[in-house]
Image: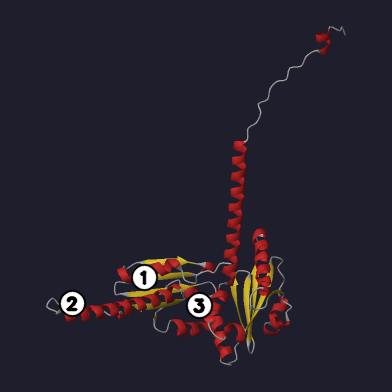
Amino acid sequence: MMLIDPQNKLLQTQIMDLIMKKDPRIVVAKDYNYSCTKLQYKEDGKLFLSFTCFNFNEIFSIAGNYMIEKYYKDYTKEAVDVGFHLTFSFDAASAKEEPKIPKNATEAEKAEIQELKLQIRAENQKLFEKVTKDFSQIRRNFYAAAFEQAFDQINKGEAASPFKYQSRENEVVYAIPDKDALNIFYEISFSDNVDRTLANLIITEIIDAKKNVKMAPPISRSNYQSSILKAAFPEVSNIKVDPNSQLITMTLFKAQHFSKNIEQLSTFLQGFRQYLHYHIHASKTYLHSRIIKRISQFQRSLQLCQFEPEVEKKTEDLFASSGVKA
């Protein structure tokens, strides 16, 4: 199984490029779930980050303030850019300026200033790396905040509220916190038969992996008649079951799974659907490459085959050769 990097690689490379080159231009990157991120570096030295997604209001109502406080409190919240839901800015002028070495400086002074320059350069580099990480992970931070907030509340002994949000057009994620656990239900739907078959195989593999992994969370297939799900969300009783859909449930326990390092766990949870989608397409690509390889081998075998030329067989008249009259 492959893990997907939560950072958007396009944004990651462009952010540092915009800051270092001070290039006033716009970069737009689209991602899963109709999400879109916009970067704009202006001549005044400010870098603007704008973000939007189709289910923004639904998720922001769950843990939007938590996300801002945890990840973006060091940035300025700006007036929302047109076509987006959230805009932050970073002032590149906040970076320290490196001192210049005077011409008449002594060797000792030059060494001291050079050491200070290296120190300031390292601090600025650390600052720019933090900005790059925070801005390039805006999508991950936004979707993971709901899970991180629930984990924090359970760890602190506070009452956490159940929440749900639409992850895709025909899919919903349900999260039901308990005193020392969090139950998560993923609704997964595939209209394509091949995708659905591969998804079933991958999910079965994930479920069976519990046999070989220590402290693995219980993962299983479920349905809308689950007592835990119906108690938290009574409306699921009225849902018409789609033959192309299935419900996957996992239970995470405080002592085993989220007493610490909730960020890595939340990264996986918020990207579980993309994780599954990615592996389906990786499997299809692998199968396709195997088929192409087998076909090329078969064609090569045909080319190496030597067929005997067809020779016209001559038949003799036995009666004529023996001199017997018919």
Q: CA distance from mark 3 to mark 2?
A: 45 Å
Circle 3 residue: 142
Q: Earlier in the sequence, mark 1 or mark 2?
A: 1
The residue at the point 34 percent across, 67 percent down is 25
Q: Which of these two is toward me, 72 or 257?
A: 257
> Label 2 is placed on what type of residue?
Ile
Please report whichever mark, 1 or 3, sits nearer to the chain's N-terminal start: 1
Front position among marks 1 and 3? 1
Instruction: Name, please, the residue furthest toward the front.
Output: 322
Q: Which residue is mark 1?
A: 16
Label 3 neighbour load within 10 Å: few <14, some 14-19, many 20+ = many
- Position of residue 228 measured from the top left corner of the image (x, y, whole percent): 70, 83
The amino acid beneath tag 3 is Phe
Q: In the figure, residue 92 lies in which quadrant?
A: bottom left
Q: Residue at image x 44%, y 67%?
A: 9
Residue 289, above or below 222: above
User: Where residue 104 appears, x then y in whole percent?
Assistant: 11, 78
Check disc 1 and give the amino acid type: Met
In terms of secondary structure, where does tag 2 sit?
Answer: loop
Q: Where is the N terminus found, in terms of image quarters?
A: bottom right
Determine crowd level at label 1: few under 14, some 14-19, many 20+ residues with C-alpha closer than 10 A.
Answer: some
Judged by depth in the image, the label closer to the viewer, 3 or 2, is 2
- For residue 283, above or below residue 252: above
Residue ID for mark 2: 101
With respect to residue 188, does 63 lie above or below? below
Q: Position of residue 280 (x, y in %)?
A: 61, 62
Res 190 seen here: no
Q: Residue furthest bottom?
A: 157
Q: Is residue 245 left or right of residue 9?
A: right
Q: Is residue 301 visible?
A: yes
